[in-house]
Amino acid sequence: MALEWVILGYAAAAEAVMIILLTLPGTYPLRKGLISVTRNLLKPFLSVVPFCLFLLLDIYWKYETRPRCKSVESCSPTELMRHQKSIVKSQRNALLIASALMFYWLLYSVTRLVTRVELLNQRVEKLKNQE
């Protein structure tokens, strides 16, 4: 089960790097290439959304089927520690899911805005050349 979290982490990191490269000032010569690469990668990165939903359901299932300690005497210290460690891992994984979804949404929005700005710049240049 750890491999899917690594994959999701790499996908979120790749999305974050693309967002940084698209919004970084001074990358105007590279911008057209970055825009085309990012636009081509948006559809494959869309698979992150159902993957995150699956992992969220996995966290929910683990939460619902976890062993319950009715009292302190009913659980050994190792079981209690294992349960607390599992809760911390689930919280970390939920943050990873939220960040991957947020980065995808940001990447989509930033790519759309940068594409629109590029199109408007081309129109302005065309109007300047006509006058």
Image: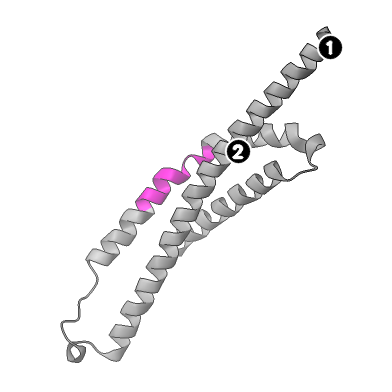
Helix, strand or loop status at disc 2: helix
**Is 26 displayed left or right of 101 in the figure?**
right
- Left/right placement of residue 124 relative to residue 43 reads right
Measured from the top left, where is residue 70 in percent x and y? 15, 82
Please name the residue that numbered disc 2 is placed on.
110
Looking at the rendered structure, the kind of residue marked 1 is Asn
Name the residue located 34 percent from the left edge and 80 percent from the top edge. Answer: 82
Do the CB atoms of the residues marked 2 and 1 lie less than 8 Å apart?
no
Query: Mark number for residue 108?
Result: none
Q: Is residue 23 above or below residue 56?
A: above
For the C terminus, which image quadrant?
Answer: top right
46 relative to 58 in the view: left or right:
right
Residue placed under numbered mark 1 in the picture: 129
Nearer the N terminus, badge 2 or badge 1? Answer: 2
**How far from the left and from the top, in percent, is residue 67?**
22, 75
**Magenta extent:** 44-54
Q: Measured from the top left, where is residue 93 in percent x and y?
A: 43, 63
Tell me if residue 39 can be seen: no
Image quadrant containing the N terminus: bottom left
Furthest-left residue in this view: 70
Q: CA distance from mark 2 to mark 1?
A: 28 Å
Q: Residue at x 53, y 57 (%)?
A: 9
Q: Residue at x 17, y 88 (%)?
A: 74
Say which amino acid is labelled 2: Val
- Is residue 117 rendered to the left or right of residue 43? right
